[in-house]
Amino acid sequence: MNVKTCKAFLILIMVVLIAMSSCSVSKQISRNATSLLLNDTAIRTGHIGISIYEPASNTYWYNYNADKNFIPASNTKLFTLYAGLKYLGDSLVAARLQKNRTAITVYPSGDPSFLNAEFKFQPLFSLLKSYKTIYINNNTWQDNALGNGWAWDDYNDDYMAERSSFPIYGNLIDFSFTGDSLTASSNAIQILSGDGIDYDPDTKKISSGYFRIERNYANNDFYIKKSAFAFKKKSIPFKTDPEFIAELLKDSLHCEDVTFFRSVTQQFDGNTEKALSHPIKSDAITTSIKAEAESAQFIIHSQPTDSLFKIMMHRSDNFFAEQTLLMASNEQLGYMNDDKIIDTILHNDLKDIPQRPQWVDGSGLSRYNLFSPQSFVYILNKMKNEFGWERIKNILATGGTGTLSAYYKKYSGYIYAKTGTLSNNCALSGYLITKKGKLLIFSVLANNYQTGATPVRRAVEKFIEAIREKY
């Protein structure tokens, strides 16, 4: 046997041994999956999909229903994170602006950090408060406040704040109750008594501490209603009508006038969109356009992008996720529209995805979203390769932190993942560093089980931890 033949023979043996090893690993994981997941009393009432992949060898260690579609809940945020990392650079665009001596025109970017209490650095606010007249060109807004497939009756809950071109205060009103006084974070709203509860808007006094607050679905009237529970504090989404945003801005900036407008009549979803906010005189628009012609457009940046992404992923913040996708749309397409940016990303950046998902929103609130476990393995691998492992580790929650605070506590620094939860559906996708130092990417999606999420999460935890300890 000559040297060439000997080398070829050795290579063949190595390939066979690797294949046998891979097959053995797959069988071992399959047995664990059957005992810990597939036969679990909670999980077997529904459906589950599992994919485990080793990037170093480009090998799937295990697949079970891995090419089938599931409702991913907040695992959708992993795709939104990719869009943000790809298109938003290292700092968020607060707005594009044009100014003259007496007025300033703002082109909103969808930045959710504006006057958000979690972000102390507010460069746009610092600039705008020096102007008495502010025009806001709303041409870039080409979407709806609520996403397709969202549960409409959750509109009163803080996890479903409306989307908008110019977010302010996280698009929430904060209510707090101290002593016998009810206070709100803005004077622009109207609080109304109801159900036998007396409230004095002048003194802020309320007749009972046992109440709840509900917003009228159609407007920004907030009603006080009886409750069996004592009220402490609550954040409630406001309706993001331009007129209301203008009032909030006037109240916050102490300026004389804030005007939303579209510089031209536009067609959107079959409806003609005309000038927004309170009625605008034609000379006001003309003045604004002349001002735009007099000065070049400039950009103000707000926060480091990763500071937003880290909160978005650790807390699973729906509002930050929705606005991230809209900001990506604005930077890439020049306007804000979920459908368009999703279609653009899927046709270009993610054109080689194993199974094309039905991707509907940024947060995962929609039950119209459908993704496969392999599609999450794909996007996690792509993010690691394109943006670097260290950056991704800094953004995702690890064991004992964020939405993993009650899980994988022994494995902090060895698992980095994103949870997802809707009623009867939960998900976990991320990275796992095994005991032998192997980096794995995994996705486990469970749908339609008839228990709460906790027993399903605990079963998945046992399965993932067993892989960590074995390999």
Image: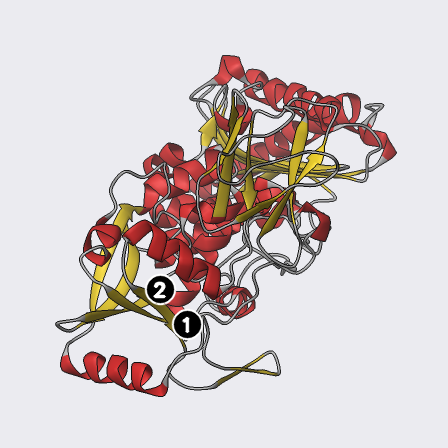
Q: Position of residue 194 (x, y in %)?
A: 70, 41
Which amino acid does the dot numbered 1 rest on? Thr
Q: Position of residue 235 (x, y in %)?
A: 54, 37
Q: Which residue is mark 1?
A: 140
Task: Indicate the quadrant where residue 289 lies.
Answer: bottom left
Q: Quadrant of the C terminus?
A: top right
**Which element carries disc 1, helix, strand or loop?**
loop
Indicate whether 300 appears above or below 463.
Answer: below
Rendered residue at 47%/19% (across/down): 436
Indicate whether 468 appears above or below 312.
Answer: above
Q: Position of residue 263 (x, y in %)?
A: 37, 82
Indicate whether 302 appears above or below 327.
Answer: above
| Left or right of 127, for residue 36 | right
Q: Which residue is mark 2?
A: 108
Q: Is residue 1 visible?
A: no
Which amino acid does the dot numbered 2 rest on? Pro
Real-space Cα distance between discs 2 and 1? 8 Å
